[in-house]
Image: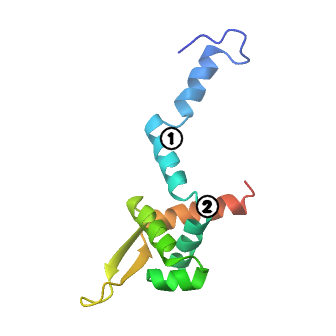
Amino acid sequence: MRAFEGGLISAAEAREVVRASLRRSAAAEIAELAKSISDPNRVRLLDLLDQHQLCPTDLAGMTGIELSVVSHHLKKARDAGLVDWWPVAVEVKNREYLLTAKGEEALQAMRSLIAEGR
Protein backbone atom coordinates (compact mmCIF):
# COMPACT_ATOMS: atom_id res chain seq x y z
CA MET A 1 0.00 0.00 0.00
CA ARG A 2 1.25 3.46 -0.82
CA ALA A 3 2.08 5.95 1.91
CA PHE A 4 -0.58 8.57 2.56
CA GLU A 5 1.57 11.68 2.55
CA GLY A 6 -0.60 14.66 3.35
CA GLY A 7 -3.73 12.47 3.54
CA LEU A 8 -6.30 12.80 6.27
CA ILE A 9 -6.17 9.21 7.53
CA SER A 10 -3.32 7.11 8.79
CA ALA A 11 -1.88 4.15 6.92
CA ALA A 12 -3.46 1.82 9.51
CA GLU A 13 -6.89 3.39 8.97
CA ALA A 14 -6.40 3.16 5.21
CA ARG A 15 -5.59 -0.58 5.46
CA GLU A 16 -8.80 -1.12 7.47
CA VAL A 17 -10.88 0.76 4.89
CA VAL A 18 -9.36 -1.27 2.06
CA ARG A 19 -9.90 -4.51 3.98
CA ALA A 20 -13.61 -3.68 4.40
CA SER A 21 -14.13 -2.60 0.78
CA LEU A 22 -15.29 -4.69 -2.15
CA ARG A 23 -12.93 -7.14 -3.75
CA ARG A 24 -12.12 -6.35 -7.36
CA SER A 25 -14.05 -9.41 -8.52
CA ALA A 26 -17.16 -8.31 -6.61
CA ALA A 27 -16.85 -4.77 -7.96
CA ALA A 28 -16.54 -6.17 -11.50
CA GLU A 29 -19.63 -8.34 -10.97
CA ILE A 30 -21.65 -5.36 -9.72
CA ALA A 31 -20.49 -3.26 -12.68
CA GLU A 32 -21.53 -6.00 -15.13
CA LEU A 33 -24.96 -6.23 -13.50
CA ALA A 34 -25.33 -2.46 -13.63
CA LYS A 35 -24.53 -2.51 -17.37
CA SER A 36 -27.09 -5.24 -17.96
CA ILE A 37 -29.88 -3.16 -16.39
CA SER A 38 -28.69 0.25 -17.58
CA ASP A 39 -31.38 0.73 -20.21
CA PRO A 40 -34.80 2.02 -19.05
CA ASN A 41 -36.63 -0.13 -21.60
CA ARG A 42 -34.84 -3.24 -20.34
CA VAL A 43 -35.83 -2.36 -16.78
CA ARG A 44 -39.46 -1.97 -17.89
CA LEU A 45 -39.35 -5.40 -19.54
CA LEU A 46 -37.84 -6.98 -16.42
CA ASP A 47 -40.54 -5.36 -14.32
CA LEU A 48 -43.27 -6.84 -16.52
CA LEU A 49 -41.61 -10.26 -16.40
CA ASP A 50 -41.61 -9.97 -12.62
CA GLN A 51 -45.42 -9.83 -12.83
CA HIS A 52 -45.96 -12.61 -15.38
CA GLN A 53 -44.22 -14.89 -17.87
CA LEU A 54 -44.61 -13.27 -21.28
CA CYS A 55 -43.63 -13.70 -24.91
CA PRO A 56 -41.81 -10.94 -26.84
CA THR A 57 -44.96 -10.07 -28.82
CA ASP A 58 -46.92 -9.46 -25.63
CA LEU A 59 -44.08 -7.41 -24.17
CA ALA A 60 -43.92 -5.28 -27.33
CA GLY A 61 -47.69 -4.72 -27.24
CA MET A 62 -47.70 -3.82 -23.54
CA THR A 63 -44.80 -1.36 -23.78
CA GLY A 64 -45.09 0.06 -27.30
CA ILE A 65 -41.46 -0.95 -27.90
CA GLU A 66 -40.73 -2.38 -31.35
CA LEU A 67 -40.57 -6.19 -31.33
CA SER A 68 -37.00 -6.21 -32.65
CA VAL A 69 -35.93 -3.91 -29.81
CA VAL A 70 -37.72 -6.11 -27.25
CA SER A 71 -35.89 -9.13 -28.66
CA HIS A 72 -32.57 -7.30 -28.42
CA HIS A 73 -33.18 -6.39 -24.78
CA LEU A 74 -34.29 -9.93 -23.92
CA LYS A 75 -31.11 -11.33 -25.47
CA LYS A 76 -28.97 -8.93 -23.41
CA ALA A 77 -30.92 -9.83 -20.26
CA ARG A 78 -30.60 -13.55 -21.02
CA ASP A 79 -26.86 -13.23 -21.67
CA ALA A 80 -26.59 -11.55 -18.24
CA GLY A 81 -28.55 -14.39 -16.62
CA LEU A 82 -31.49 -12.16 -15.68
CA VAL A 83 -34.14 -13.97 -17.74
CA ASP A 84 -34.67 -17.39 -19.23
CA TRP A 85 -37.15 -18.78 -21.75
CA TRP A 86 -38.77 -21.94 -22.98
CA PRO A 87 -40.80 -22.80 -26.10
CA VAL A 88 -44.54 -22.29 -25.67
CA ALA A 89 -45.27 -25.25 -27.97
CA VAL A 90 -43.12 -27.55 -30.06
CA GLU A 91 -44.68 -26.50 -33.37
CA VAL A 92 -44.57 -22.78 -32.54
CA LYS A 93 -41.35 -20.76 -32.54
CA ASN A 94 -42.68 -18.45 -29.85
CA ARG A 95 -41.07 -18.38 -26.42
CA GLU A 96 -42.18 -17.24 -23.02
CA TYR A 97 -39.67 -15.39 -20.88
CA LEU A 98 -39.43 -15.29 -17.11
CA LEU A 99 -37.11 -13.73 -14.58
CA THR A 100 -34.41 -15.91 -13.10
CA ALA A 101 -33.50 -15.73 -9.42
CA LYS A 102 -30.66 -13.38 -10.39
CA GLY A 103 -33.13 -11.19 -12.30
CA GLU A 104 -35.47 -11.07 -9.32
CA GLU A 105 -32.58 -10.09 -7.04
CA ALA A 106 -31.44 -7.35 -9.43
CA LEU A 107 -34.95 -5.92 -9.70
CA GLN A 108 -35.40 -6.03 -5.92
CA ALA A 109 -32.06 -4.26 -5.41
CA MET A 110 -33.13 -1.49 -7.82
CA ARG A 111 -36.46 -1.10 -6.05
CA SER A 112 -34.71 -0.90 -2.68
CA LEU A 113 -32.37 1.82 -3.91
CA ILE A 114 -35.31 3.81 -5.23
CA ALA A 115 -37.24 3.36 -1.98
CA GLU A 116 -34.24 4.54 0.01
CA GLY A 117 -34.02 7.64 -2.17
CA ARG A 118 -30.51 6.93 -3.43
Q: Residue 110 has which mark? A: 2
x and y, in percent, of residue 39 in the image:
58, 61
Neighbour tally class for label 1: few under 14, some 14-19, many 20 plus, Cα within 10 Å: few
Q: Amino acid at mark 2?
A: Met
x and y, in percent, of residue 32 in the image:
48, 49
Residue carrying label 1: 27
Neighbour tally class for label 2: few under 14, some 14-19, many 20 plus, Cα within 10 Å: some
What residue is shown at x 41% (from left), y 66% (from top)? 75
Residue 39 to residue 21: above or below: below
Colouring style: rainbow
Q: Amino acid at mark 1?
A: Ala
Which quadrant holds residue 6? top right
Earlier sequence position, callout 2 versus callout 1: 1
In terms of secondary structure, where does tag 2 sit?
Answer: helix
What residue is shown at x 60% (from left), y 10% (from top)? 3
x and y, in percent, of residue 80 in the image:
42, 58
Q: Residue 108 has which mark? A: none
Which quadrant holds residue 95? bottom left
